[in-house]
Image (cartoon, rainbow, N blue to C red):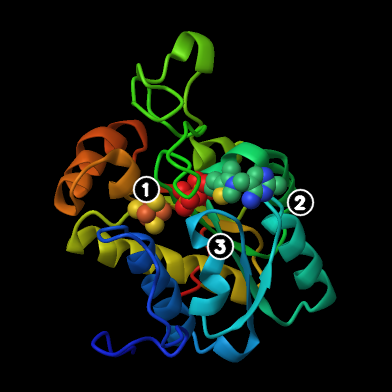
Amino acid sequence: MVNKITRPVSLTEKPFHYCPGCTHGIIHRLVGEAIDSLDIRERTIGVASVGCSVLTYEYFNTDMQQAAHGRAPAVATGIKRVLPDRIVFTYQGDGDLAAIGTAEIIHAAARGENITVIFINNANFGMTGGQMAPTTLPGQITTTSPAGRNTDTAGYPIRIPEMLATLTGPAYLSRVSVHSPGQVKKAARSIEKAFAYQLAGKGFSLVEVLSTCPTNWKLKPEKALDWLKQNMLPYYPLGEFMDIGEEVL
Ligand SMILES: Cc1ncc(C[n+]2csc(CCOP(=O)(O)OP(=O)(O)O)c2C)c(N)n1
Ligand code: SF4
């Protein structure tokens, strides 16, 4: 049982650099709590990607590795195959995972690699100034879609867990959100379950977390939570899209 009042041991003391109201920080905490709860910190290796979460190697109190844009699943695959007794996770934004890293994530899932992927969907490229991402909603205004995402020319957003659920390789695929305390609790359980699948050797697990980017959405933190709820939930339904059904927790 983890004491929720104190900082998870799996997070360092370093203050986060994220903008006020950005939910990257909440998600870091949930990942730290899951690692604490399963008592796997000393054998966990995280793979940081690019994007606003590029500095995760400074925040997680585990061994960490940095990967180039989109390549975190390949780096995690290599680490896990060389050190199969370690618990290996990636932490990737939607620009990282669903744009330049699309091939990497599909093939890691198809191979059923025994790794855990934490996928942060904030519907834009946050770090580089709020450009349109594969996850940007139809009609959503971004710096590269000032008139709103036009599906005639830019196509439709990709629903990653649903897409990966067509494969045989994954063991656990879910989508959660952190826009309210109740949803944060559900997200915590899903993230811990994803790690537990890996611990039990069941194969590839991915949790998509709907997240805010108040800065690039140009909304105050509270309004950003409302925007997520009103606009992202209808397009990105929460739930489990693959669960091989083993009782791992
Ligand atoms: C190989 C390579 N190409 C492009 C970039 C530039 N780049 C850095 S962060 C980023 C966007 C990341 O957005 P996302 O993954 O959605 O994360 P967020 O910042 O929203 O959390 C891009 C395009 C890079 N660092 N490396
Ligand atoms: S730019 Fe967006 S994703 Fe990046 S830290 Fe700020 S609010 Fe968070």
Q: The N terminus appears in which quarter of the rendering? A: bottom left
Per the rendering, the mark at residue 54 is 3
Crowd class of label 3 (few under 14; some 14 to 19; many from 20; radius 10 Å): some
- Which is more toward the observer, 45 or 20? 20
Q: Residue at x 51, y 65 (%)?
A: 194
Label 3 near ligand 1 (CB < 8 Å)? yes
Q: Residue at x 64, y 66 (%)?
A: 202
| Amino acid of disc 1 | Gly
Mark sitting earlier along the chain (3/2): 3
Q: Residue at x 26, y 61 (%)?
A: 20
Residue 201 placement, left or right of 130 = right
| Amino acid of disc 3 | Val
Residue 215 placement, left or right of 129 = left
Crowd class of label 1 (few under 14; some 14 to 19; many from 20; radius 10 Å): some
Per the rendering, the mark at residue 239 is 1
- Which is more toward the observer, 223 or 159? 223
Q: Residue at x 35, y 19 (%)?
A: 148
Disc 2: which residue: 111
How many badges with numbers are in the image? 3
Residue 241 placement, left or right of 84 = left
| Amino acid of disc 2 | Arg
Label 2–label 1 contact, CB within 8 A = no
